[in-house]
Image (cartoon, rainbow, N blue to C red):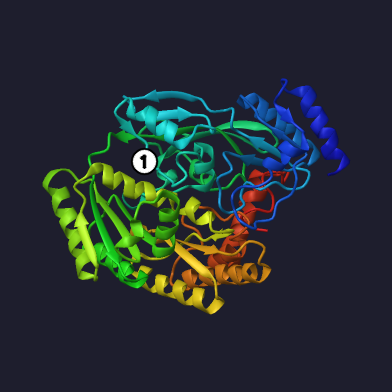
């Protein structure tokens, strides 16, 4: 910690209302990192928990004047190290800026503060007969601000898109403490550059988001659930490719492998692993006869790809329990040991090949890799599980992590489908985009962050 940072912490305590600034070392440690296993982190000089935009502006202006880094944080559920503290930084935690400002059923928009929890917004929208689609697996805990910062995805993205597709406008504190409004609240608008889209997914490197306007959809139609078990990852991947080739756009198509199934069983005693090694969960929410036909097509694709057992679920509670198990896969695997989480995305027709390559990488590096996936859009989440305090296994897992990144790029994929680049994917991003495009990123960063304070060192070095 520098003397400047320490002086700033005292300065902020004097400038902001009581209780906003936290300096207790034990509390600071709890805000130092997100859930990315092994991503490096430092110790902040202070955590500020603002309640309004003016307080955020005050923090940013003072940090810019002194050159002190600002790291924005939502709920800390990230998996790339994007919200990890830098030594001597100020962490801006938006947990107290959690107001749903308004929901407009006529215009089908919602205006929210960044600390609103995803599921809380979805429930509030449902009371108006509306639906906010982006649904990351962390939806019960993650915040809209964090979802916007990482351009989060989710289970229904295969049909309904990611967070960026729903963000109409933003209020943000940028530069040296300027408050700006970007985007619009109208159904259409093409004035100027898409600066709203630029900030979505920028991982806090271009400014600090203080308010978000999102578009909403009408209440979701009832879904039909299709279940299939397979003896291998590759066979399940072939079923995914078959669904894509058939022209069906499911409302969800999720994969859970034997390691995850067994981990959930050991935790929740659901009997998921009794029928096979890999579970595919498909859904269709098309209305009427079209939905019936989609469900039948998905079921046929499962059978043709060699499903050992497949069926349409006729019990809504059973169907919801299966998708709840999908969301439990990551915390269940975490119970087995430290987990390094991947987030690559490949063209949908290359899913079987990528899953086969992941299995070979696991064997070659002698580590256990569990797999869950938003398989319908090619977004795979290999989970590298290592024994506690096993440095050799950790090194093998890190090597496997980088191999998987390179294999995904080699198949025409990308290093991250929804978790963000953060700290863990910087090398992969540089490989994926190349030096010219990386230079464009740096130029944008320098133009919009002249003081160099917004989450420095993340996304690219």
Instruction: Measuring from the top left, give residue 282's x and y in whole percent.
Output: 27, 54
Q: Residue at x 28, y 34 (%)?
A: 218
Instruction: Measuring from the top left, give residue 418's x and y in whole percent.
Output: 47, 53
> Depth check: 163 or 300 in front?
300
Q: Is residue 139 above or below residue 103?
A: below
Element at label 1: loop
Q: Residue at x 47, y 77 (%)?
A: 360
Residue that protrudes farthest toward the top in the picture: 17
Q: Residue at x 85, y 39 (%)?
A: 4
Q: Is residue 228 left or right of residue 408?
A: left
> Depth check: 385 or 117 in front?
385
Instruction: Measuring from the top left, give residue 324's x and y in whole percent.
Output: 37, 46
Q: Is residue 173 left or right of residue 170?
A: right
Q: Is residue 11 above or below residue 295?
A: above
Residue matched to label 1:
133
Give the quarter of the image for residue 451: top right
């Amino acid at each position: 910690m520098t003397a400047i940072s320490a002086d700033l912490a005292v300065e902020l305590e004097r400038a902001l209302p009581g209780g906003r600034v936290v300096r207790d070392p034990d509390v600071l440690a709890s805000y130092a990192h997100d859930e990315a296993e092994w991503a490096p982190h430092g110790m902040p000089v202070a955590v500020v928990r603002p309640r309004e935009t003016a307080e955020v502006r005050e923090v940013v202006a003072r940090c810019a004047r002194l050159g002190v880094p600002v790291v924005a944080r939502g709920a800390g559920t990230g998996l790339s190290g994007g919200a990890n503290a830098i030594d001597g930084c100020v962490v801006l935690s938006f947990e107290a800026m959690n107001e749903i400002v308004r929901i407009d059923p006529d215009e089908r928009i919602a205006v929210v503060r960044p600390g609103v929890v995803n599921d809380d917004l979805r429930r509030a929208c449902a009371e108006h007969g509306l639906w906010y689609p982006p649904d990351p697996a962390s939806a019960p805990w993650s915040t809209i601000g964090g979802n916007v910062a990482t351009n989060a995805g989710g289970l229904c993205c295969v049909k309904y898109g990611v967070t960026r597709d729903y963000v109409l406008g933003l209020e943000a504190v940028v530069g040296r403490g300027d408050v700006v409004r970007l985007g619009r609240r109208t159904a259409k608008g093409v004035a100027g550059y898409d600066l709203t889209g630029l900030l979505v997914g920028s991982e806090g490197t271009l400014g600090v988001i203080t308010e978000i306007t999102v578009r909403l959809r009408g209440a979701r139609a009832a879904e039909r659930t299709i279940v299939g078990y397979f003896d291998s990852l590759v066979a399940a991947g072939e079923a995914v490719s078959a669904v894509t080739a058939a022209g069906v756009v499911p409302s969800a198509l999720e994969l859970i492998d034997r390691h995850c199934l067994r981990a959930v069983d050991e935790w929740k005693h659901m009997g998921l692993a009794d029928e096979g090694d890999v579970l595919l969960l498909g859904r269709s929410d098309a209305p009427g006869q079209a939905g019936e036909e989609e469900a039948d097509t998905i079921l046929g694709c499962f059978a043709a790809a060699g499903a050992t057992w497949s069926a349409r679920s006729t019990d809504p509670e059973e169907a919801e329990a299966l998708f709840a198990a999908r969301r439990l896969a990551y915390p269940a695997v975490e119970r087995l040991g430290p987990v390094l989480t991947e987030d690559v995305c490949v063209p949908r027709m290359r899913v079987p090949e990528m899953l086969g390559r992941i299995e070979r990488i696991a064997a070659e590096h002698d580590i256990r890799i569990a797999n869950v996936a938003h398989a319908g859009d090619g977004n795979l989440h290999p989970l590298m599980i290592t024994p506690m305090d096993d440095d050799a296994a950790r090194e093998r897992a890190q090597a496997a992590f980088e191999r998987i990144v390179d294999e995904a790029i080699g198949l025409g994929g990308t290093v991250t489908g929804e978790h963000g680049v953060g700290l863990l994917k910087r090398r992969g991003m540089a490989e994926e985009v190349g030096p010219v495009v990386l230079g464009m990123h740096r130029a944008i960063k320098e133009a919009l962050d002249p003081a160099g304070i917004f989450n420095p060192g993340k996304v690219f070095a």
